[in-house]
Amino acid sequence: MGLFRRRSKQNTSLVAYYLSHDGGLPEGYTRLLDCPEVVSCINRIAAIIGSTTIFLMQNTKDGDRRVKNGLSRFVDVEPWPGVATRQVWMTWIVATLLGEGDGNAFVLPRFTGRMLSALEPMPGASLVGDPKAGTYTVTWRGKTYTPDEVLHFRLFADLTEPWRGRGLRVQAQRVAASLLRAGAVKDALNDPAYKPPIIISVDSDADLTDDGKREEFRKKYLEKPEEEGKPWVLPEGLVKVDTIKPLSLTDLAIKDTVELDKKTVAAIYGVPLFILGLGTYNQAEYNSFIKTWVEPICIGIEQELTLQLLISDEMYFQFNRRRLYSYDLKSLIDLDLAMSDRGYLNGDEVREDAYRDPAGLKEYKVLENYLPYDMSGKQKKLIQEDDHEEDDDSET
């Protein structure tokens, strides 16, 4: 793995203040990870990116090719050896960017000698900007790091401090708080302790002014544990029973409010509505979500990995774009077959997309009527027509 950069030594500094998940939150603060709808959006995006292979690519005169070596395997399989695989590691990065990291996620390269040994996540790392110098430092666990010592992944660029990432926490927190309140009301209404009160109107002639007599009346006519579930049978004209109907979610307009808040969360995180249970799955909508939202996040991660880990100008990291999009198997195979007819894919490449083992089909084949442009005038049928015309001229 000799294609990566070597970082300088670490310096000590102040301990970074961090709002942890286990407490210490200011009054009125709502964690995004406490809201199921927000978590659903973050987890879906993180899962998509975390499950996508990271390629190490190299520019060549014949086009860009994938490189398979120790460094590519390290980043793609186990960037944090003994602790997390690439899927877990990348999921943490993306979830931090979209959630409590507020657009910033930091990873610390660890070295054994001159060899890269780990890419360790830095939960709770704090960015300290220096507007006059136009730069910043990162503090974590009592140490200070310069920008070239860490991997700094950003979601968006802050407008006043471009070195700082800008996330979605501010936009999402208010709607998250609203959803949490709606959830609390729903839980309260569904609680078994929440029962409609019963009002019993007793005939005025009955002497129930005494507490003891009221209790005796209740036990005699209204309490029969041995007959639970059976209707009451009361003397006609003795009492009148009324119930108060409890307020429902519809009465409180909770359903409409929750649906509106879900749509707002979906808009903030750019996800299709069906991810939050609204509407049905739509492939075109999903692929648009990948193109306009997931891919830009991937590009930012690719560029940071390339900039900080590679020295060679001919090499770069890239996510496997094809695995990001949603294709049903038939459409994918039909596309592969069309490309194989033109010699763009061989048989084993088609079989790979059909989840079948290689069969030694390495030859690229084309249909006989597909010819290079500069040979279009040498088709046999055209040559025969020219010869026939020459024969006709000679007879005349």
Image: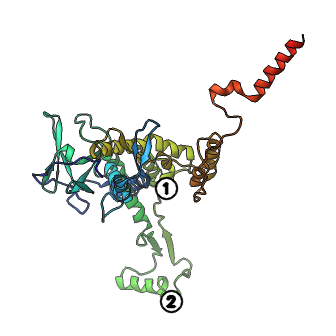
Which amino acid type is marked by label 2?
Answer: Glu
* SS of the residue under disc 1: loop
Q: Which of 218 and 113 is in front in this view?
A: 113
Q: Nearer the viewer, residue 37 or 312?
A: 312
Residue at mark 1: 250
**Would residue 268 be visible to someone looking at this image?**
no
Q: Can you tell which mark lies on residue 218?
A: none
Drawn side of residue 140 relative to residue 217, left or right: left
Q: Quadrant of the C terminus?
A: top right
Which amino acid type is marked by label 1?
Answer: Thr
* SS of the residue under disc 2: helix
Total numbered badges shown on the rendered structure: 2
Q: Which of 365 and 83 is in front in this view?
A: 365
Query: Which numbered disc, 2 or 1, marks the residue that appears first in the sequence?
Result: 2
Drawn side of residue 189 relative to residue 280, left or right: left
Q: Position of residue 169 (x, y in %)?
A: 31, 47
Say which of marks 2 and 1 sits in front: 1
**Rendering quarter of residue 73:** bottom left
**Would residue 373 be visible to someone looking at this image?**
yes
Drawn side of residue 61 relative to residue 13, left or right: right
**Rendering quarter of residue 83:** bottom left
Q: Position of residue 326 (x, y in %)?
A: 54, 49
Residue at mark 2: 226
**Residue found at the very far right of the displayed protein:** 395
Q: Where is residue 340 in the image (x, y as percent from the top left)?
A: 63, 44
Q: Residue at x 35, y 55 (%)?
A: 70
Q: Residues within 10 Å of mark 2 (few under 14, many from 20)?
A: few
Q: Position of residue 206 (x, y in %)?
A: 45, 80
